[in-house]
Image (tube, rainbow, N blue to C red):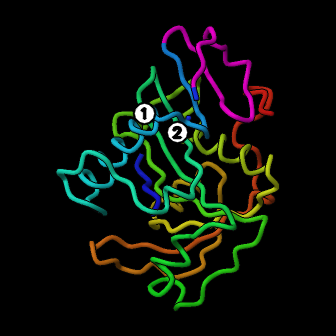
């Protein structure tokens, strides 16, 4: 499920915010430095798993237990991981489930949200899950003049467009849909909000990138 509150590094010299690549967007402000990547190395993944435990196991108590140092599951083995790092520290995260891999919406949440009628996993679709921003960087915090959430979702938008992925399926809280809508990512509900065992309300939704504008204009990020 997506949390609403608000990838390998090389030994190259720091890049400015006028350079991006399909693999990673690096933003340099003097100081600090920022990186969004969908190919995190092992050290970065370790930081991201620890951040997931911080948010999902302790702050929200949605999965695992407060004692867990890392949070991961079987879906991680077939997912693409997007991480936001500020000065090398994990700050934001989400993972992408491609059309030919298991989706949470069609497995774990199929019965409760879709009445056991899974959505079709087309080649131009994916699922996004485990989205989060570290608690210290929510709200009015900005990175290169943009909120961290916007940078993370902008990288997702570029990642999907470069792979002809138009539809993004999600299991979200109603609050998450509102946050997304406020930044122009209006989604279509696929179910009504349902109260989960942990007391949190969740719903299925789909975002159509063909119907939303570029979150961060290319003139600012020079996205590939």
Asked whether, in this view, residue 39 is left or right of residue 142, the answer is: right
Q: Earlier in the sequence, mark 1 or mark 2?
A: 2
* Residue at image point 60% right, 55% down: 96
Magenta residue check for 148: no
Q: Tell me if residue 71 comes above or below residue 75 in the rendering.
A: above
* Residue at image point 66% right, 52% down: 184
Asked whether, in this view, residue 187 is left or right of residue 139, the answer is: right
Q: Tell me if residue 144 comes above or below residue 14 in the rendering.
A: below
Image quadrant in which the N terminus is located: bottom left
**Are circles 1 and 2 on residues that touch, CB within 8 Å?**
yes
* Residue at image point 77% right, 60% down: 166
Q: Tell me if residue 164 comes above or below residue 124 in the rendering.
A: above
The total of numbered circles placed on residues is 2
Q: Which residues are magenta?
A: 9-31
On the image, the x and y values in percent for residue 165 come to 77, 58
Residue underneath mark 1: 90
Label 1 to label 2: alpha-carbon separation: 7 Å
Our reading of the magenta stretch's main secondary structure is loop
On the image, the x and y values in percent for residue 121 come to 70, 74
């Amino acid at each position: 499920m997506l949390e609403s509150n608000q990838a390998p590094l090389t030994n190259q010299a720091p890049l400015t915010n006028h350079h991006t690549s399909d693999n990673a967007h690096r933003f340099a402000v003097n100081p600090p430095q920022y990186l969004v990547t969908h190919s995190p190395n092992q050290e970065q993944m370790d930081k991201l798993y620890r951040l997931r435990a911080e948010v999902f196991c302790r702050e929200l108590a949605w999965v695992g237990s407060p004692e867990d140092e890392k949070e991961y599951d079987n879906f991680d083995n077939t997912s693409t991981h997007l991480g936001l790092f500020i000065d090398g520290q994990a700050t934001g995260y989400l993972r992408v489930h491609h059309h030919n891999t298991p989706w949470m919406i069609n497995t774990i949440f199929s019965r409760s949200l879709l009445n056991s009628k899974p959505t079709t996993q087309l080649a131009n679709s994916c699922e996004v899950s485990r989205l989060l921003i570290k608690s210290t960087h929510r709200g009015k915090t900005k990175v290169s003049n943009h909120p961290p959430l916007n940078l993370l979702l902008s990288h997702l938008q570029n990642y999907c467009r470069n792979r002809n992925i138009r539809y993004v399926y999600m299991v979200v809280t109603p609050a998450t849909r509102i946050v997304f809508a406020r930044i122009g990512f209006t989604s279509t509900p696929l179910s009504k909000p349902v109260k989960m065992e942990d007391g949190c309300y969740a719903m299925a939704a789909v975002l159509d990138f063909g119907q939303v504008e570029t979150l961060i204009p290319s003139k600012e990020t020079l996205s590939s």
